[in-house]
Image: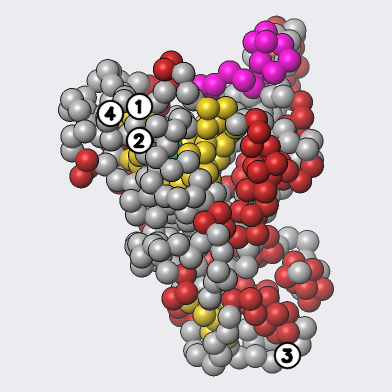
Amino acid sequence: MLLALLAQTSRATSTLSSSSLLARRSLPIAFTSHRNISTNNSCNISNINNTRASAISGTRIRSIRLRATEPEQSPFGNSNSNNNDIPNQNSRLFSTLISSPEEVETNIETNMEDTKDVLPNGFLEDIPLELTEDERYLFDLNGFLIVRNVLTPEEVQQANAAIDKHQVNMKDRSDDALRNATPNTAFYGTGPPRKDLGGVLEWEGDDSKIFKSILAHPKLVPRFHGLLGKGYRMDHLPFIIANDKGGEGFQLHGGTVDCGTGEYNHNLAYTCHHGTIRSALMGCSVILSDHYAGAGGFCVVPGSHKSNFKMPAGMIDGERYQEYIMQPVTRAGDVVLFSEGTVHGAMSWKADYQRRICLYRFAPATNSYGRSYFSAHTDGDASASTRWPEKMYEGLNDAQRAVLEPPYANRLDRPNINEDGSIVITTRNGRKKTHDSDVFGTKYF
Ligand SMILES: O=C(O)CCC(=O)C(=O)O
């Protein structure tokens, strides 16, 4: 709607600034700039688009102050659960200055340049063009970052409806060999095993749509670029993790210094050189049910991506030093990005409703950990195919398809995602390709 209206009102420009382009793609909550606040109106968030629409279609509104309120919902869509620690969205303020139809786009651009809003718990709500300084600081300090409201409540509901449809295929991790925690420890819970559900990117039509959107989501691409670099790629097959009440968590694992062995694990390296952060392998946990304080689920040892020593005995099972293990409070629609080099796990699930997340792993262009990108129909014969399961490619846009490329360097004709979601091929000089063909019989060394 906003997109169409902006298209109508904007003067035809062949080169739009990236901030404007992002604004066109942005979710409803895109315009925040405290500098522009001059209170005139307060209204429910459901009126935001209408208000914008009237501003865009000609009503002269000098400034709007919007206060968001949320509908009552289930835990699978930003719930009203008894949760005092979740940032109170009702108190979040949205404001934008709209002067005339012609100025709408300009104002959006202005606001997008420095949009930044710190939530009560210190985490960020914004739509940046790149990893912000605050995010860079938080990720470097803690080894993880929470990106709020990536999915709208409607998208969360859509994703959960698709899971409901396919939940008959959930596989319990019930065998001893599959359990992720040691019995009678804090992470084990009271019994029910974790449930895993794969195939999310291969589901028919709309069932996979939300899950495909994560691959190159406008709210995530700048963060992926900041933490993984351009040309980032999906590494593992994403899947749903579900836990019923009492359900088993996952003992602590990962770590650049492996928390179990104490050995350095370069496959999970975290580096920050010359101001550039890189995570050799990054977890991306899309939260699909609320995780209130004490509910359990994903937990992390903040800062452990830079640890130099083996974890003390007992901590890996949550039996000792629990006060150093943190369970981030998240709501359905949030996304947690974490370096796999940050020691993490999951606490047993305490809430009455089912825990649901979709876990992805992404990596820099030249990194590979998983092998399913070439195993789909060739059973691991790399020479036959370097493609993921064929159904994954259905209905993808160019940016999403780019993220499914196998690992190879950007200088070898790799599709990179631009800020506006379009693709640019990082072209290799034609003469070099011909030369390599002459030498190797293939245009890429
Ligand atoms: O349940 C979680 O959030 C963590 C899961 C995890 O780390 C894993 O499956 O490797």
Q: Amino acid at mark 2?
A: Gly
View quadrant of ligand 1: top left
Mark 1 and mark 3 in contact? Answer it, CB < 8 Å. Answer: no
> Callout 3: few (<14), some (14-19), or many (20+) C-alpha neighbours within 10 Å?
some
To which residue does mark 4 refer?
184
To which residue does mark 1 refer?
181
Helix, strand or loop status at disc 3: loop
The x and y percentages for residue 431 are 73, 22
Seen at 49% across and 50% down, the residue is 353
Q: Which dot marks residue 59?
A: 3
Q: Could you tell me which quadrant the N terminus lies in?
A: bottom right
The x and y percentages for residue 236 are 56, 27
Q: Which dot marks residue 189?
A: 2
Residue 380 among magenta residues: yes
Q: Which residues are magenta?
A: 368-381
Mark 1 and mark 2 in contact? Answer it, CB < 8 Å. Answer: yes
Mark 4 or mark 2, earlier in chain: 4
Seen at 72% across and 11% down, the residue is 378
Give whichever of 51, 186 is nearer the camera: 186
Can residue 216 be seen by looking at this rendering?
no
Q: CA distance from mark 4 to mark 1?
A: 9 Å
Q: Which dot marks residue 130?
A: none
Helix, strand or loop status at disc 4: loop
Mark 2 or mark 3, earlier in chain: 3
